């Protein structure tokens, strides 16, 4: 099972290293990790996706709480949060396939951000399922290169 955890930390040198070290030292694997500034510039928000059962999640949470720079931990349960991921990819095209790639981009609300003679670069955002479906369709054209941000998540609150 995959768990999404949001960790608010102090925005200080070495915090990421300590948190990543805690995961590797305990044998926990991070599926995705995304870090960026939070609303308060003295803090950063880490969105971590970790694989394991509830016991693994409990252990991860306990270990994170022991770290001095950790301010708050949220374990996002299904339907309690919204999430997005960014994908940049370069796809091979020719005169016969360019229009089809553009049509698929329109359906997925993806943006073509660079056009070259033999390839196009595309930006697409969405949840993990949308990103994976888009990638599956693009494989037919030949994916030249890609990069993904990993998940970012925000709690749903009224």
Image (tube, rainbow, N blue to C red):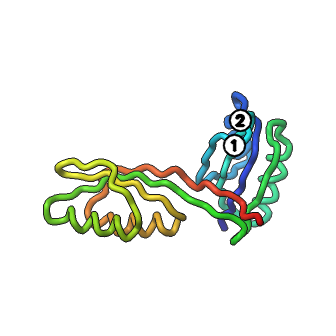
Q: According to the image, label 1 marks what residue?
A: 38
- Label 1 near label 2: C-beta < 8 Å? yes
| Classed neighbour count for the residue bearing mark 1: other residues with Cα under 10 Å, few (<14), some (14–19), many (≥20) | some
- Along the line of sight, the residue nearer the viewer: 151 or 104: 104
Identify the element where label 1 is drawn: loop
| Classed neighbour count for the residue bearing mark 2: other residues with Cα under 10 Å, few (<14), some (14–19), many (≥20) | few
Identify the element where label 2 is drawn: loop
Query: In percent of the image, x 41 and y 65: which residue is there?
Result: 109
Place residue 2 in its image quadrant: bottom right
Q: CA distance from mark 2 to mark 1?
A: 6 Å
- Along the line of sight, the residue nearer the viewer: 24 or 150: 150
Q: Is residue 147 left or right of residue 48?
A: left
Q: Quadrant of the N terminus?
A: bottom right
Query: In percent of the image, x 63 and y 42: which residue is there?
Result: 36
Q: Quadrant of the C terminus?
A: bottom right
> Residue 115, image x and y in percent?
25, 49
Q: Which mark is residue 14?
A: none
Query: In percent of the image, x 32 and y 51: which residue is there?
Result: 121
Q: Is residue 76 above or below residue 35?
A: below
Place residue 108 in its image quadrant: bottom left
Q: According to the image, label 2 marks what residue?
A: 41
Place residue 9 in its image quadrant: top right
Query: In percent of the image, x 69 and y 71: which residue is there?
Result: 79
Q: Is residue 67 left or right of residue 25?
A: right
> Residue 51, image x and y in percent?
66, 60
Q: Is residue 45 above or below residue 128?
A: above
Q: Is residue 92 left or right of residue 128?
A: left
> Residue 49, image x and y in percent?
64, 56
């Amino acid at each position: 099972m995959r768990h999404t955890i949001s960790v608010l930390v102090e925005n200080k040198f070495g915090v990421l290293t300590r948190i990543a070290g805690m995961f590797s030292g305990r044998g926990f694997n991070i599926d995705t990790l995304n870090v960026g500034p939070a609303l308060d510039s003295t803090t950063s928000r880490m969105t971590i996706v970790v694989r394991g059962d509830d016991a693994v999640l409990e252990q991860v949470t306990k270990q994170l709480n022991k770290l001095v720079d950790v301010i708050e931990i949220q374990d996002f349960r299904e339907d309690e949060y919204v999430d997005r991921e960014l994908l940049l990819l370069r796809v091979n095209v020719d005169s016969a396939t360019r229009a089809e790639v553009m049509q698929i981009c329109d359906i997925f609300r993806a943006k073509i951000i660079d056009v070259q003679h033999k390839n196009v670069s595309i930006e697409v955002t969405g949840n993990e399922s949308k990103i994976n479906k888009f990638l599956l369709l693009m494989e037919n054209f030949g994916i030249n290169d890609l990069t993904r941000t990993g998940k970012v998540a925000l709690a749903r609150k009224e």
